[in-house]
Amino acid sequence: MVKILNRKKLVPNIHMIEISAPDVVEKCQPGQFVMLMPDKKGERIPLSLADWDKDKGSITCVFMAVGTSTQKLTRLNQGDEIPVCVGPLGKPAEIDKFGTVLCAAGCYGIGAIYPIARALKKAGNTVMTLIDAKAKYLIYWEDRFKKISEKYFVSARDGFYDCKDYIPKVLKDVLEENPIDRVVSIGCTYLMYTCSEATKHLNIDTYVNLNPLMVDGTGMCGACRLRVGKGTKFACVDGPEFDGHEVDWNELFYRRKSYFDDEIRSMCYWERTKKQRK
Ligand code: FES
């Protein structure tokens, strides 16, 4: 059992959870993830590492409440325990001196990209950040990104940042006006696909941290398989970071929908039986 040190809502539908995991924190690197089980009867779910504190022995993940298991996580609070926290898993993100790196993120990816952006800055890169959100009230950790970013861009539709455009238009403008050597993108599949498409004809290296369905997270079940270039890869052990220009996006979109109906049924059942569990 591992103890929850903090769990709070960052913005509507996006939560952070800090867990005491001294064994995990010793080996954490940017771009990796952990597998958690919110309760003994639940499924294992992958969550990207958003931060960690070696002195405290804790790791922090940011997640979106999107299915039954993540909804269960939102019901847990400081002092509660969860039965499983395995990690760190996956290969770390590539950190080197690339020049100017644009970190583009949205949703849970804002948290997940933070340790990568921080490590890239530490490695001597000029870091620029592009955050995508529907509106200002869905953006979090702005202060953290502003501290490490040479330039900070937002694509939001509420006009708060003098912008009402979606990410393809904002990204195009950013790429036209800034000499970018590499793009790293984390967020929903559409955001990562968009970033990869926008940079392809410009020959800008673009790396995405993919989020296919996972079951074991250790390369044994095959649930997370995807096509990258000419080969089949398992996101949990070969990734989750991949060359965005090589990813078979159509297959990834299709496979991510595989259990959509079951997920809805599961949520409905969980909501229906809520009273019995109280
Ligand atoms: S989650 Fe099972 S092989 Fe990757």
Image (cartoon, grey):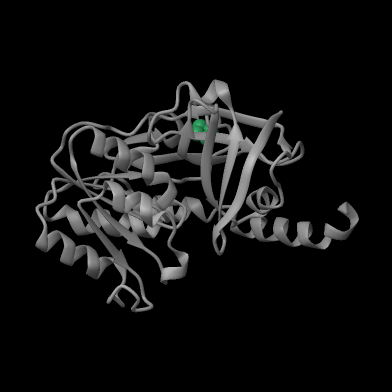
Q: In the figure, 243 relative to 88: above or below?
A: below
In the rendered image, is residue 219 in sight?
no
Residue at horizontal 32%, vertical 56%?
A: 193
Rendered-image quadrant of the N terminus: top right
Between 229 and 165, the one nearer to me in the picture: 165
**Image position, residue 229 (x, y; %):** 27, 40
Residue at horizontal 16%, vertical 67%?
A: 173
Relative placement, left or right, of 209 versus 245 is right
**Image position, residue 21 (x, y; %):** 59, 27
Which image quarter: residue 271?
bottom right
Residue at horizontal 26%, vertical 32%?
A: 95
Relative placement, left or right, of 4 versus 152 is right
Residue at horizontal 44%, vertical 27%?
A: 28
In the rendered image, is residue 255 in sight?
yes
Q: In the figure, 8 relative to 46: above or below?
A: below
**Image position, residue 150 (x, y; %):** 20, 51
